[in-house]
Image: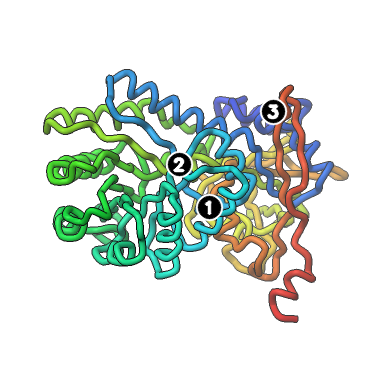
Amino acid sequence: MNRYIDLIEQTFDFPTKEFHVENNELFFNGVNLMEIIETYGTPLKLTYLPKISENIQNAKKYFSDAIKNHNYQGDYTYCYCTKSSHFSFVLDEALKNNIHIETSSTFDIPLVRSLFEKGKITKETFIICNGFKREKYKQYISELLNDGFNCVPILDNLTEIDYYLEHVNVPFQVGIRIAADEEPKFGFYTSRLGVRYNDIISLYEEKIKDNPKVSLKMLHFFINSGIRDTAYYWSELTRFIQKYVELKRVAPSLDSMDIGGGWPIKTNVFFDYDYAYMADQIVKNIKWMCAKNNTVEPNIFTEFGSYTVGESGAVLYSVLEEKLQNDKELWYMIDGSFITQLPDSWGLNQKYIMLAVNNWDEEYHNISLGGLTCDSMDYYNSEAHQFNIYLPKIEAGKKQYIGFFHTGAYQESLGGYGGIQHCLIPAPKHVLIDRDENGKVRHWLFAKDQTEESMLKTLGY
């Protein structure tokens, strides 16, 4: 008999650090998922909190080792990109690790205020403020600065600084975001965000250089493809470092370089990204370019969002029914929706690790997965997945459960958490998982299933 467990072990290097099987049931970071399902039912989302701290500490070590290996003179600062997941439990866990914060829009700032009031951050915590800013965002930033927070607005255009110069009453620091070139396959040549390379120095000289109220601290860089070992990334990074060197010659207060986010997460069991190598090469390249140009090495900031929180998340479903739609298209219908609950799988064709939760000793077959909405695109099959999807055959009297893993970044935000979903599909319950001081697993319900009453109220009924 060709069993599902044999297929997985023969196809992948399995078990892995995150996944193993006991008694034909899947464990995720040492957590028995069937125990979670039996306690709470499906569909459910879960967050394994220790993974957040683990990834942060790993990144800090990669950069610390690289700095030590190259005798690099600058410091490393880890910022969490809040837009990846604004949930309080994510911030609470992340901030246990002496990190800083990067914001993207207006209402991140009340979130920052709340964290301060609860003692989660101090006024020394870096608040790096990115994005194209409407007036209220600039107002909130100005209020943080006036109240003594270590806030660094990153200028996204040539006029943004005018607001701060008018409304901030204390000396403050700013950064400038460079508008990087996009990948050749992208629809535009240059990012819509940031200041053009040719305008950087003139912006500094005309509005910052001779104003005693403001100083330039940081040059900021981000590309959509993320930090990957490609000719495109290294070319853009080199160009960015060269601009830093040029700007440093006229701006002595400039001492920091923000290389943005974009470290990838494991979206398949074959994942082979070398984090330590990438951190080492980034530090090595910056040091070499600075030495070549007789420039003091800058402090390095990163803004990791998906990397921080993505691998902590999972979504678990039940298979409701098996449907054969023609001679060869076999469907498993799940008790949830890909469009509403995993919108990146639909909108970006995002890949996730997908595994059976139980019945690993059963025979397997090739299937497609269908969601609950009436939209024809609410599916997950070999086109959406990296390979054909194989799951255990459903035996009479047995329930089949499946899990999508490393889903912790962006999905709740994009799906409209707690709001109105396509076909009024309710948001699933959300379970938090942690370990006590002895390493024992503990779990609790963060949010119940969304109710019909809450949806009707939102809709005005």
Residue 242 x, y percent position in the rendering: 17, 41
Question: Residue at point 53% right, 47% down?
Answer: 385
In the picture, the quarter occupied by the N terminus is top right
Residue 19 x, y percent position in the rendering: 64, 30
**Quarter-of-image position of residue 69:** top left
Furthest-right residue in view?
A: 397
Question: Residue at point 31% right, 50% down?
Answer: 173
Badge 3 density bin: few <14, some 14–19, many ≥20, Cα 10 Å: few
Point out the tag, 2 or 1, that comes first from the N-terminus: 1
Point out the tag, 1 or 3, that comes first from the N-terminus: 3
Badge 1 density bin: few <14, some 14–19, many ≥20, Cα 10 Å: some
Q: Which kind of residue does numbered mark 1 sit on?
A: Val
Q: Residue 271 or 254: which is nearer the viewer?
A: 254
Q: CA distance from mark 1 to mark 3?
A: 33 Å
Which residue is tagged 3?
30
Point out the tag, 2 or 3, that comes first from the N-terminus: 3
Q: Residue 434 or 152: which is nearer the viewer?
A: 152
Left or right of 350 on screen, residue 227: left
Which residue is tagged 2?
124
